Amino acid sequence: MMWEKAFALLSHFRGSHKSRFGICTVMLKKHRGQPIVCQDATVINQGEWVGELHLDNERILKLIRSEGSDRAALQTARMLRKSMQQINEAFESQSEFRQVKALLGITLLHRGLTHGLGFEQQNIKSGVFERITTIYLRLLLSAMHPEGRQRINRRTEQLVPMLLIHSRASLKNRFSPGQNYSG
């Protein structure tokens, strides 16, 4: 997927460190913008370190094409859960993650794929970033979903990007060994 490669190239210059965890990539960067207040009272201020979470969309697309959308969704959810466990381990043990306050991601798939992973969801503030993100994610979904454009046209009002957040503490509470991962 060409736009994914272009995005990856551009994002290479935005972060200080990038790590791969199964189906996910986490890019460390300094937060820009308004403070984010998490449900557990963690506040992420401008200039503080966050981990920006990205899914491997090319891998998901291959799964959809080979297994069908239902099986691909189940497999992706399992892989995502395993990736989250690995990310939590890195937050606990790797020095480059020591100053990271939270794990952040932006997605249209907040209603289905992230269920059971414990992410806090917040609206993205309206503006240019929100509009560009919506266009990009809808384009990505139309390319990846078997129903393509019809899927987007049918549920446009529900396809709004959301900010997914795991503060350092909520990630640890959810994915440390011995915790219940099911929901």
Image (cartoon, helix red, strand yellow):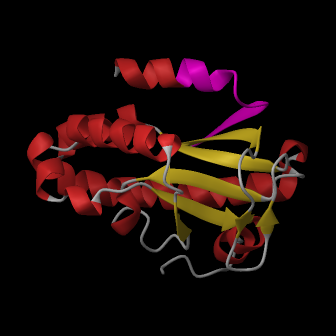
Q: Quadrant of the N terminus?
A: top left
Q: Nearer the viewer, residue 107 or 133?
A: 133
Vertical comparison of 39 with 16: above or below: below
Residue 133 or residue 70, whichever sits in front = 133
> Please, is residue 134 above or below residue 82 in the view?
above
- Looking at this rendering, what residue extends furthest in the front direction? 127
112 lies above or below 8: below
Q: Is residue 90 left or right of residue 107?
A: right
- Residue for point 11% across, 56% down: 154
- The answer to if 10 sits in the magenta stretch is yes
Residue name at image x 47 percent, y 18 percent: 6
Give how far across and how far down residue 179 sits, in percent. 65, 80
Q: Determine the image quadrant of residue 32.
A: top right
* Residue positioned 19% across, 51% down in the render: 69
List x then y, in percent, for residue 115: 42, 71
For residue 147: magenta? no
Residue 8 seen? yes
> How many circles with numbers are drawn on the protein?
0
Q: Nearer the viewer, residue 154 or 25?
A: 154
Boundaries of the magenta span: 8-21
